[in-house]
Image (cartoon, grey):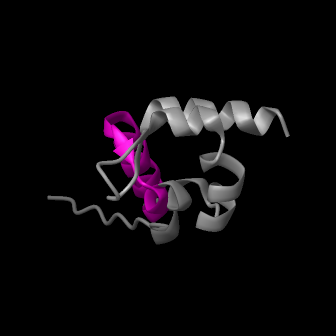
Amino acid sequence: MAFIEVKVDVDQEEIRKQVNERIDKAIQETLFLWDINEMAKRTCMGKTFLEEEFLRDPRMKLLERRKGKGKRFWFYEQSLTAMQQIMEEW
């Protein structure tokens, strides 16, 4: 009986990157609403910048949902499209 020895070098950082990309894609496909914290995280922009440049825009105001003085939410897909339109006007 012959034995075969196999050695595999694995790049842990590349695996981690691939896993994170797949998780992000899955989240994007299932994300319905997002808040300013998630928006800041996913766009790599600060909350203050988002407030000043995007969230005061009438297109984003139309998408904002809030009950009373509670937490604000935006529809993910629609707000992402509005943010792209706003950026194209810069």
Indicate whether 88 appears above or below 64: above
Direction front: furthest residue: 68
Quick one: 23 or 62, which is closer to the camera? 62
Is residue 4 located in the magenta-colored stretch of the structure? no
Residue 71: percent from the left, percent from the top?
A: 35, 58
Identity of the residue drawn at 59% across and 54% down: 43
Indicate whether 69 appears above or below 61: below
Count of all numbered marks drawn on residues in the image: 0
Magenta span main SS:
helix
In screen coordinates, is 56 left or right of 20? right
In screen coordinates, is 90 left or right of 77? right
Q: Within the image, what quadrant is residue 29 found in? A: top left
In screen coordinates, is 63 left or right of 51? left
Residue 60: percent from the left, percent from the top?
A: 56, 38
The quarter of the rendered structure image containing the N terminus is: bottom left
Quick one: 12 or 54, which is closer to the camera? 54
Direction right: furthest residue: 90
Identity of the residue drawn at 39% across and 67% down: 7
Identity of the residue drawn at 42% across and 49% down: 24
Residue 57: percent from the left, percent from the top?
A: 66, 41
Q: Within the image, what quadrant is residue 46 found in? A: bottom right
Residue 68: percent from the left, percent from the top?
A: 31, 52
In screen coordinates, is 10 left or right of 4? right
Identity of the residue drawn at 40% across and 55% down: 19
Quick one: 15 or 28, which is closer to the camera? 28
The quarter of the rendered structure image containing the C terminus is: top right
Range drawn in magenta: 16-38
